[in-house]
Image (tube, grey):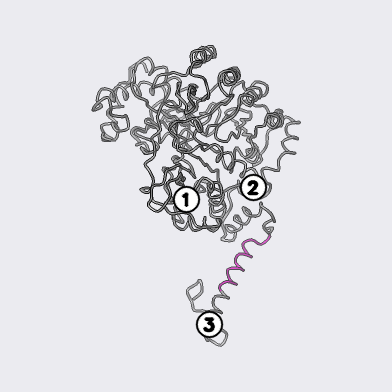
Amino acid sequence: MNDSGTSIRGPDGMDFSEAQKRYLEGLGRGLAIARATQGQAPAPAGPDGIAYAAQNRFLARGQVLAKEEEAKRARHGLDLWDLIAVNAQKGEFPKGTDAFLYRYHGLFHTAPTQNSFMLRLCIPNGILDAERLRAVAGVAEEHGGGYADVTTRANLQVREIGPRAALAVLECLAAAGLSSRGAGADNIRNITGSPTAGIDPQEIYDTRALGISLHHAIVQHRELYGLPRKFNIAFDGGGVVSSLAETNDIGFIAARTTASGLPASVHFRVEIGGITGHGDFAKDLGVAVPPEQCVHVALAMLRVYIDEGDRTDRRHARLKYVLDRMGPEDFLTAVEKYLPAPLLRLARSDCDPPSLPQRDAHLGFHPQRQPGRVYCGIALPVGRLTAAQMRGIADIASRFGSGTVRLTVWQNIIVSDIAATDKEQVRTRLADLGLSAEVSHLSAGFVACTGNSGCRFAAADTKRHALECMAHLERTVALDVPILIHLTGCPNSCAQHAIGDIGLLATRIRTGEDSDVEGYHLYLGGGYGERRALGREVRRDVPARELPHVLEHLLRGYLAQRSSAMESFQDFIQRQSTQALRALVAPGIPEEV
């Protein structure tokens, strides 16, 4: 039978043999591909050809590439240096899809919210030394708005950079031993790891070397740029501060193996397909990988993603959708084709239960595994700090620590290796900078994306609203447990609203025929780690001006109605019906609001 359902016969009416049928069917497919790709250049030789060949497979099926794929096909994003130089000399921003390609160099044109560039760095593991933090402060002060934001990928962003400074900031980074290469567009985003790696008394494995090795492997493999979409990878060594590995496309999570017949050792369980903005945590793949194989396994998975990821529909181009289509076993089989040997299959039950992270361990002073040493987690309201504060933190790290500064996915900074006897001096220095290591459970729990003050996708000014809610709740509610409150500006969910105890997704609320106001949809009961859960939508269209009072009433209700002081917010939410929760957040809005 051919594709139309009729029998394939020879000119004399006799049936072809099976071998002849297979030959003719293959010839037909080849001709179809040739027709579909007629006029298209063949895939170039070398690493760029891998993605080009993947695009050709979609074209051969008569599909239309996304405009970003067409842009990557026409010119590789890493080959823009001369264009950046010319535009900088003219004082011009990139036009059309060149703005997308600029992101390969970490430069984002943020118009119309800010007619300037945002510069995103690459800081593997979120760890840098004091001198490099001073260099970032210099870039922010000389070329940007004088501040930087710590991101939810333990990274730094500098905003308000003018078009003439585009090349200068890249040169400044290179001179300081920093880079923004591949920080945006369809590339592998900042490799995150446990922020207390190497100093954590609880950790199973120090993940720093793995993050660095993978970072450099990516830098040296050109074929890993221009993926079907962006890609997130994290390592978690089992320490007290989570890296949120389960929210990544690939999460490597350290575990001690206990299966009979295996020597006791540390392996990494592999979880894949996490993207909470699309309603999914990463799922355990059922394998255990020795530390020395993690980088090779990550590269093999990336190759499968290049081959299989959607090049036509950006909404479904993430690894989650490859897994949904292929299934975990077929995906694993495809991965193993790029490895020298099959991976070790191992059930979760054959590993020790993981140590639980501590929700507030990223803030305050905590003992290190090194005797007499502590680390200091510094609170940064909604992740923003000035150039002066960056220099001040660098000075503290150099004077009282080892010169090491660690960023976290919770949008704060840790300075490590401080002598326990120097805590009071560090407190004083932080106070001089307008910062503190010890804040309330409320202030410690806020996470906010950039919002519409700097991102064209955001529907609300998330950072401003977070600060307003924080100030109001500090005056009105005395919490005795940590509560995570995540505000995100759009469904891309950079601030991961779905995993917060309280998640807030920005929206525009129509108030009249030609007017609307900023507001939020309210989600409750999210979690991460062993308590992972996606928040339940409880209320839609809460105006931003009402939000502080809605949160106040919600938190007061939790404190008054919880079964005991030991009942977590998540447990309290889970035992409530959606109707009861709607009633809990509905009243309490004063008339003057």
Which residues are the magenta region? 25-39
User: Label 1's element?
Assistant: helix
- Residue that badge 1 annotates: 321
Question: Given the image, on which type of amino acid does mark 3 rest?
Answer: Ser
Residue 386 picture quarter: top right
Residue 484, above or below 419: below
Residue type at mark 1? Tyr
Q: Which mark is residue 17?
A: 3
Quadrant in the picture for the C terminus = top left
Q: Total marks drawn?
A: 3
* Label 2 SS: loop
Residue count near mark 2 (Cα–Cα under 10 Å), binned few <14, some 14–19, many ≥20 = few
Residue depth check, mark 2 versus mark 3: number of the one nearer the observer: 2
**Image position, residue 454 (x, y; %):** 56, 28
State the residue position of label 2.
221
Seen at 75% across and 31% down, the residue is 90
User: If you read the primary sequence from the N terminus, does the residue marked by circle 1 or circle 2 appear first?
Assistant: 2
Work out whether residue 506 can be spotted.
Answer: no
* Residue 26 part of the magenta-drawn span: yes
| Vertical side of 98 occupied by 434: above or below | above
- Rounded to the nearest angstrom, the CA distance separating label 1 from label 2 is 24 Å
- Image location (x, y in percent) of residue 249: 49, 44
- Residue placed farthest to the bottom in the image? 12
Which corner quadrant of the image does residue 352 belong to? top left
Q: State the image coordinates of residue 34 (x, y, percent, origin top left).
A: 64, 65
Query: Which of pointers 3 and 1 lies earlier in the amino acid sequence?
Result: 3
Rendering coords of residue 172 (x, y %): 70, 28
Most common secondary structure along the magenta stretch: helix
Do labels 2 and 3 touch, CB within 8 Å?
no
Q: Is residue 250 magenta?
A: no
